[in-house]
Image: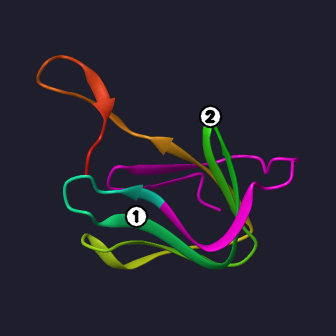
Amino acid sequence: MQRQIRQGDVLLVAVERPTSPPTRRTTRLVLAKGEMTGHAHVITAPLIEVWESEDGVIFSLSSEGVLVHEQHDPTGHVIAAPVTYQVVPQHELNLAGEWREVMD
């Protein structure tokens, strides 16, 4: 298992699977949508369990998934399972000296 995966401005960090039930289940999860280009970082898998809270997003794969970016990485990055990752928002210092989330 990879402890971290980075794809552009998306960072995934391996964490323990939450003990609470997931807030939703899906086969396609948008991790970040490009505000400038409209392209997205997306994970697809037969089943993705998602925990969403004010602290962020955690997702778990019980079988292999693929992380793609429609513009920069259309063939994708295979993610071996089982694994649980937290999505860590990336920040940058703008020209005004203020921290903000990275915009794609």
Q: Is 27 placed above or below 101 here?
A: below
Region rendered in magenta? 1-30
Determine whether the residue tagged by mark 2 lies in a helix, strand or loop: loop
Q: Amino acid at mark 2?
A: Glu
Residue drawn at (26%, 63%), measured in percent from left and top?
A: 38
- Give the quadrant of residue 76: bottom left
For image coordinates 24% across by 19% down, the residue present is 98
Q: Which callout, 2 or 1, points to the residue nearer the camera?
A: 2
> Can residue 10 be seen here?
yes
- Location of mark 1 (residue): 41
Label 2 packing within 10 angstroms: few (<14), some (14-19), many (20+): few
x, y percentage for residue 78?
52, 76
Q: In what element is the residue under mark 1?
A: strand
Counting the numbered discs, the total is 2
Visual colour scheme: rainbow
Based on the picture, tell me whether residue 78 belongs to the magenta stretch.
no
- Tell me the quarter of the picture where residue 22 sits: bottom right
Residue 54, disc: 2
Q: Residue 5, percent across and down? A: 49, 56
Nearest to the observer: residue 15 or residue 59: 59
Query: Where 35 sits versus 82, above or below?
Result: above
Which residue is located at x 40 percent, y 64 percent?
41
Marks 2 and 1, how far apart in space? 20 Å
Q: Is residue 6 left or right of residue 70?
A: right
